[in-house]
Image: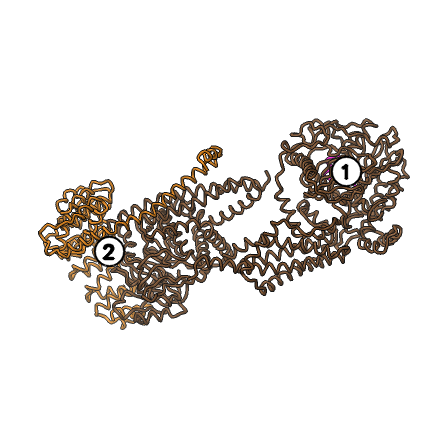
Amino acid sequence: MGGGELYAILKNLSLLEGLFFTCFACLLLGVTFTFFYLLTVNWHHRRKKQQRDFIEEFICNVILESDELADTDISIPPAISELLTHNYYKEFILNELLIAKKNLQGSAGHVLKSLYEQLSLNNYSQSKLKKHGWHHKVKGIQELAEMEQVSALHQLYPLINSKNEALRGAALSAIVKLSGFEGLKFIENLSYPLSEWLQINLLNDLPKHAGNHLKGIEKWLLSSNTSVVVFALKLTRVYQLFELYQQVSDCLKHKEEIVRIEAVRSLQFIYNESTPSSLIQSYHNQENKRYQLIVLSALTEMVTNEDIPFLLSEFKASDDDIKLAAGRTLLKSNEIDLESLSYSNLHPWSSIIKQIKSEVA
Amino acid sequence: MIVVDWVLYIIGWGLLLYAIFLFASYFFIAYCSIAGIKSYLRKRSVTDYRLIATSDMAPRVSILAPAYNEGATIVENVRSLLSIHYNNLELVVINDGSKDDSLQKLIDTYDLYKAEHYVQEKIKAKNVRGIYKSRNPVYHKLIVVDKENGGKADALNVGVNVSSNDYILCIDVDCILVQDTLLKIIKPFLESSNGERIIASGGAVRIANSCEIENGRLKKVNLPRNFLARIQSLEYIRAFLLGRMAWSHINGLLLVSGAFGIFDKEIVIKCGGYNHNTVGEDMELIVRMRRYMMDRKLPHRVIYIPDPLCWTEAPESYEILGRQRNRWTRGTMEVLWTHRRMFFNHRYGILGLLSLPFWFLYEYFAPILETIGWITFGIIAIKGDFLMYYVYLIAFVIFFNFTFSVFAILMEVATFNQYKKPSEVLKLIGTAAAEPFVYHPFTVWSALKGNIDLIRRKNSWGEMTRKGFVANSNGQSAATEPKIPIFKQLIQQLTTAFSVFAAISLAWLLIIIGLSSYEFILDGLRHQFPERMMDVGAQKLFSDLLFWLKGTLCMCLPFTLISFLSLKLARTFYIAVVTLLSLGQLILTNYFITALSPLGADLYGYALIDIKQTLVASGSVNIQMIVTILAGTFVAWLLLQAISARIKVNRWVAAVAPLLSLGVLFSGFSGIKHAPQLEYISNLTLNKTGYFIGESVSHFLPAKETDILNAKKVPDNFSYVNEQQYPFLHVDSTADVLTPFFNLKSEKPNVVILLVEGLGRAYTNEGAYLGNFTPFIDSLSKQSLYWENFLSTGGRTFAVLPSVLGSLPFLEKGFLEAGEKMPEHLSLLSLLKLNDYQTSFYYGGYSHFDNMNTFLRKNNIDEIHDMGTFPEGYTWLPKNSEGFSWGYNDKELYRLYLNTKKETTKPQLSVLLTISSHSPFLINEQETYNQRFEQRLTELQFDEKSKKEHRNYKAQYTSILYTDDAIKGFFEGYAKRADFNNTIFLITGDHRMSEIPQSTTIDRFHVPLIIYSPLLKRSAKFDAVSTHFDITPSLLAFLAENYSIKKPSLVSWIGKGLDTTRQQRNNHAYPIMFTKNTLYDFVAGDYHLNKNTLFKVLPDMNEVEVENQHITSQLKSGFNQFKMRNNRVINGAKLLPDSIYNAYFPTKK
């Protein structure tokens, strides 16, 4: 069918027919494009496999020779330099370096950092901070942080107030990673919440031992930002900051349940002889079952004789979860033989006692 | 536009709007899913999930895995779940009362012991028989719960009761989870920081068929080799990657897959856990959780992760897949119904305003609407109206769906890229192309079945047989799959189906032969066996064989299609259809034996009450007949079942057989050529069911007629004045042919018209080929003007009044059938009344039959005397075995007339319609007329053979004799009146009796016309052909000429006037309506056209079939012209202008 004939046919179409034809043609174009794209996308990926293998081998060799390469410039093969002119391979090399750096410490990590700088990938990472999409910026921040680019800190500070949650989280995490506890000072005046995910990241990024570097937590425990209080409580737990016991104990009266719960958890790690009574007192002030269970669980580590009457009364509570938690704590106390209780043969105590005894066994 | 057209029109527009909204929603889904996936992938690229795995701060999760009869694979599956990389994890496997050794295998493998564990029933569930934990600290995360069987929902509820962590991940135990599944799916719960609580999260489920599995871990992803599993892969990509992602993005997600989803346990418990009263428990829980949160105005979200985190086995057989889809449909409807209060309820935000309505309209209702659409398309295709638009729409819908599937494949490759090989991508695209034709109809069918089961309150899961992941010799597992290639599978399935089809078809053939023999023998016994018995028998057999061939060909395609779903269903369907056809054949055979003409579309022209009356009157519908028919049908069904099960037809032979049918039918072979034969014999050899079906199809789907303006004009010598507005209006040019035969008085003569039921020329008057059984009418004809080659205009009584008295067209089903909507018209009755005649109608039955009274009333008749107005002292016709009688016999009718019709100075027009010679032919003085019949046979000098043949129709002939006698009595009585000498009598039959076999087609309409009067100068016999249409024009012309009666110059008569030529000729061209739904006959000149068959009319009104294309075309053209005019009146055109009607209609009572 020639063009002229096709034109003649098209010219004679009614409006509805024309509409159908147009939509049909658009869909056909879409399908054709998709078809060819699908066929070629993996082909390109497969075509670059050889180059990728080469890069992996190069990095492996660098790692293996890291002891010899420390404090010296690494010899960069021309092929690598050539590949670095393409963004695809630049990104690939960068990712490989990051993966290796995350898993390796010591001289190997140091050499990888050198290689990163030698290949000018730090500039590449920094250029991402200027890109439009937040994901580029976050990637750049993570790269700079992982590769210990302290010089980039000044670029990160403005980002901790970004509207984008992922961006400010990445910036804060990177600052903490690069400057340790010092970086935590920025959470003092945070106006946005710290998600649990960010808290996990920060805790992971912080050094394993605080020493004398962890300062200012007492202020954070009084923050109006609930998530900051929670994070501070976690810090007291992780770093066992006994000196903050009173402030933590005061948090048992906080208006937010999540703070109270976190305070109980923290007190498990920094408790003293008055802790059980504080917990029991707060227990009575709360009717929240979840809180009560956490308190009962926390008492397991610190229970004394004086606490037994309380536990016995809770062992007879109407809620079976409370019974179970109280029973566990009673058993752990070794102060009382549960089977000697008058109701120990009654349901559900008989089953509960058997269960918690088997857990211990 | 008739009602059916309106309904189709509305459905068509409705479907179009639905499609437009559907496409718009697809675009919306595509847009939202792109946005959602983009956002997720960006976040994922910057997330280190390993932190969650090792962090003490990570949420505590319990995996709940219900298991039922999973003994073959449970050990591996649990091992796979225990290897999940997550710190704060507990695995709860719930053995839901398995009947196999699932529990024992777990005990043995994982060193389990029955632990003391207090199960708090936070959610009510079936009894727990025991809790098992492992002695091996490596498996410290594992808890196995053994419980009474209660179903998946109940098992999960038990898992909730037993679990000790805050989040529950509910999965199917045989699902394969990738290593970082938990890390990815729990992360959304950690990210919530704006007060919005994440209550549930789900991930993409993918198809694991043909994938390489090693030690319970997914090693390599392959596209399923099984066609069905592959289509489901595509379906899952569309549903999970596009649909769910879009809904999650706008926080309108209603569903987290039951195979894989994580929930906030606290909310689950507060909601009451899984509902075990529904098979859609996964969706129901999410909707209930969301409703709980919304009722308390608690901000929340349900998240969907597009990452392929869970791999499961898809059904590879239609049977199991059908059960699954059936269950999904039932589950969907149960959930939507349970939460119906949320529909369009603004309290529930996007869920109530968008998600639920969308789910109902496009997930649940779509298969139902699609089925309606296809049925509509079928009707449209047959009717032909708007066909191309429907074809465009369907083609566009199919292609759009294909495009959407390709887009989904594009998204998959561009994002998670599980199928990397080009061949796999190509296969997916090919699958997308095949889906609308192969897979989609099946899912629609399963959904419809689901609805049926729902109505039947079926609430089981059905057996979901799984093959499991079986290890090969390398320790690798691959999902088991059939070894037979799909193409061979298809061929096998087809040939098996053909084999079964052929067996049933052969059984049907035997039944047809049996029914054919039954009809032949019964007819012979009731009436007479045909002379050339073998010849006629062979004709009949061939006719039935041809019907069987056509029938099997029509049934072949639906049978084959249904067999893909279920061979058993296809078999049941075919047997049911054949049984029904056999029942139909028995009914139609019995009808034919009684009426001696096959039942066609005339059935649809009668009201139910009329049909009932006719059946009861005939006396043929009795217990004996009903029992015979039902017994016959039952026997047919039994034979079908028994014979078809025993016949084994080679599958390849069976596959070829339908092609043979096609070949025979296409060759145009229509039966054995035979010599010209009686119409009755032709009817006897017809296959009655095939005839009825063919006539019905023609009735409901008539062939399009050409437009009147474009029809080739055949001159009918009428001067039409305005064919557009008044199709029949023409200048009245009827010649007065009667005056030369009359000595007229100054007073206007009385006119008495006797319309005699069933008075056919075949047995009336001298020269009747069946013998003259009307001696009186015969003698009268010799003193009358006698047209011996006269034709009625209908094959039944419905046509006689409007044709004789008004020369009126037939409209759709006879003029009378229009009832109150009869177009305004003038007739002999109204015009003579205008001219001071007293008009009256006398009938021995009820005049409402066939709307006769309506017609008479609309002609402002002065008197109607019928069964309802007969005074006491008159005798009915004898009642039949059912206690029915048509009414008063003819002698009583005439007696009433003579007693009530007083002689006056006013001229009278009286119309009398008889009933005695109507089925069941029961007459008073039966014995007398039986003797008269025997006597007449002798008088007519019949040989014994002829006598014997006539005795087969004794009832009919005796009724004719009776009728003739009654007319004799009438004339004897009338002759005593003073006005006898100024009366003109017309006697004609409404049609020929059908219960005596006809010799030709035209024989049915061959009746005599006698015009007798003392005013006649002389008698005359005319051989020229005239019809009922010609009576009124000629009478009026006669009366106008001699008595100056007022009549219009523009008329709408069909007839041109009586032809008083002695030699046989026919200068008319008229249609004849055989029954209310069959307008097949057209007589013009020397020819008679019946459907597409041309007959040449011979001098004695016999006829022979001829072939002459030119003449056939001419007659068809003339016939079409009439039909066009007739249709215009049916569609609202008038017969007469108001001016004429108002001027000539007698308004005074």
* Residue placed under numbered mark 2 in the picture: B52
Q: Which of B787/B621 is in front?
A: B787
Q: Check if residue B859 falls in the magenta segment.
A: yes
Q: Chain of mark 2?
A: B
Q: Nearer the viewer, residue B798 or A41?
A: A41
Q: Position of residue B532 (x, y in %)?
A: 76, 55
* x and y, in percent, of residue A2 in the image: 45, 36
Q: CA distance from mark 1 to mark 2?
A: 100 Å
Would you identify the image quadrant in which residue A322 lies?
bottom left
What chain does mark 1 sit on?
B
Kindly indicate which chain is depicted in brown in the rendered structure: B
Q: Which span is picked out in magenta?
A: B852-865
Please name the residue that numbered disc 1 is placed on: B1028
Q: Is residue B315 left or right of residue B571?
A: left
- Among the chains pictured, the one given orange colouring is A
Instruction: Kindly identify which numbered label has been placed on residue B734.
Output: none
